[in-house]
Amino acid sequence: MRTARLTLVGVVGLSACVLGTTLGAGVAAAAPCGNGGFGSSVPDTGSLGSSGSLGSTGSTGSLGSSGVPNIGPQGPLPPYFGVSTRSVAWVTGPLSPNRTFSRFGISGTDLGVSWDNGRGQTLMAFGDTFGDCNALGQQWRHNVLLRTNDDRLADGIRVPDGVVGDPSSGTVIAPGEPNYAQELIPSVGISAIEVTTIPTAAMSLPRGDGFRQYINYMSVRSWGSAGNWITNFSAIAHSDDNGQTWQTDQNTIRINSPISLALPAALPDVEYNNGKFQQNAYVRGRPDMADQRDYVYQFGTPNGRFGAAFLARFRPADILDLDRYEYWGGEALGWVGLAEMPDVESRVVQQPVTELSVAWSPYLDKYVMLDGDNGIRMRTADRPEGPWSAPRYLVVPNTIVVYGPMMLPNSPALQGDSPELYFNASRWSDYNVMLLRSDLSRVPR
């Protein structure tokens, strides 16, 4: 029981150093270092080698195999030219314009949850991240952060160098390692207890004379078959130094299922409806509507890629006070408390909904929702609670096979009267993030 108690305390706040000393580094479930067939000629590094197979499938569905270079499986950017959407450039990886392997120790990663830090800089949070595939533990980090001031997205996203102690530089540099992005939110890294902590949503809100950054993340207990995983809980971590350091607020923990551990008394009880908010997306209410502009809306889904989407709202000052959240209970009930939230009636989008992002588009005069685990689909609505349109594909399924679309906050379609929408998406086989551009005027209404 002593180890179990350490585990739960660890996932809500112990330093990565203490976790590594007490419980070990664990084994990653995603396997980008064992996904062969790419990277035979890479300008980012002259050191090629091989690595053994992890032999497992993670949330991305990437499969392990042996005999690959030490920089992972990334290949050239796959060209995609659809009716409305085209691929622009890699954001991460040795072959990206950002050369993230040599500059940040990132050979493979996914997601790229994007938000404005309140001062016009875009922050991007990534999930399980790997570096040198031949190094001990393959330089696995549970999550990392990149920053950019680039507002010309037509030729890709440029990330500046990381500088030790500089909270506006390209990444959080690990102490004593000038070219290595530091992990943000630690995890125990032990299978069947907590294998990783992955950001699913993020935003900034004013605080005092500055801005506080918030990341909503999921604690993953175990991976299952493709598209299935089980979470311990979701929670909110916050940063007052532009993402340099993060602290989880234990009052925001939403436990997904009963946990047979010695729980600290401060942790909340299990609530059935908390399971509907294990993966999330934030959006501010449209500024020209009096009944929406004072709220942040939180879209939630259960763990995995097969649940429906549900909706909560809160005033910005109450983001860390779950007792003040309201939940959409359907047309008959309106906004209710968590305990009163019904199941079917409160679904704003029917299953399956995967990792998603939501934004308000002045160009469309509608809310936009993106999701998808093979192709990328878009839905629109006049109000957060819907009704949401039928999905329309921006990236056709079974073409370049991408997932986890995360809209860039400085996309012209989210800023003014322009149809250009940019979003990050992750590619399974390359286990890296690419930038795509959609012309919303070419998407069927």
Image: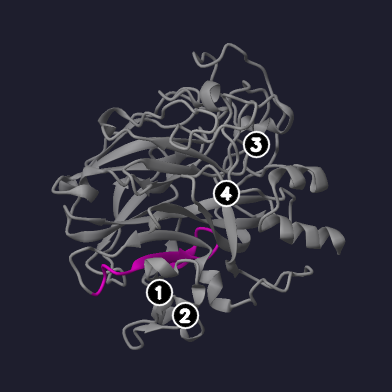
- Res 270 label: none
Mark 2–mark 4 Cα distance, whole angstroms, equals 26 Å
Label 3 or label 4, whichever lies nearer to me, is 3
The mark nearer the N terminus, 1 or 4, is: 4
Number of residues whose C-alpha sits closer than 10 Å to that of mark 3, classed few (under 14), some (14–19) or many (20 or more)? many
Q: Identify residue for label 1.
A: 347
Q: Are marks 1 and 3 in contact (CB under 8 Å)?
A: no
Give the quadrant of residue 17.
top right
The amino acid type, in three-letter code, at marker 4 is Ser
Question: x and y percent of residue 105 in the render?
Answer: 58, 27
The amino acid type, in three-letter code, at marker 1 is Arg
The vertical placement of 66 against 355, above or below, is above
Q: Which residues are magenta?
A: 291-310
Q: Identify residue for label 4.
A: 59
Question: x and y percent of residue 11 in the render?
Answer: 68, 56
Q: Are marks 3 and 2 in contact (CB under 8 Å)?
A: no
Quadrant containing the C terminus is bottom left
State the residue at coordinates (34%, 84%). Answer: 334
Mark 3–mark 2 Cα distance, whole angstroms, equals 38 Å
Quadrant containing the N terminus is bottom right
Q: Residue furthest bottom?
A: 332
Q: Is residue 334 rendered magenta in the image?
A: no
Q: Identify residue for label 2.
A: 343
The one of 164 and 11 positioned closer to us in this rendering: 164
Residue 26 visible within the image: no
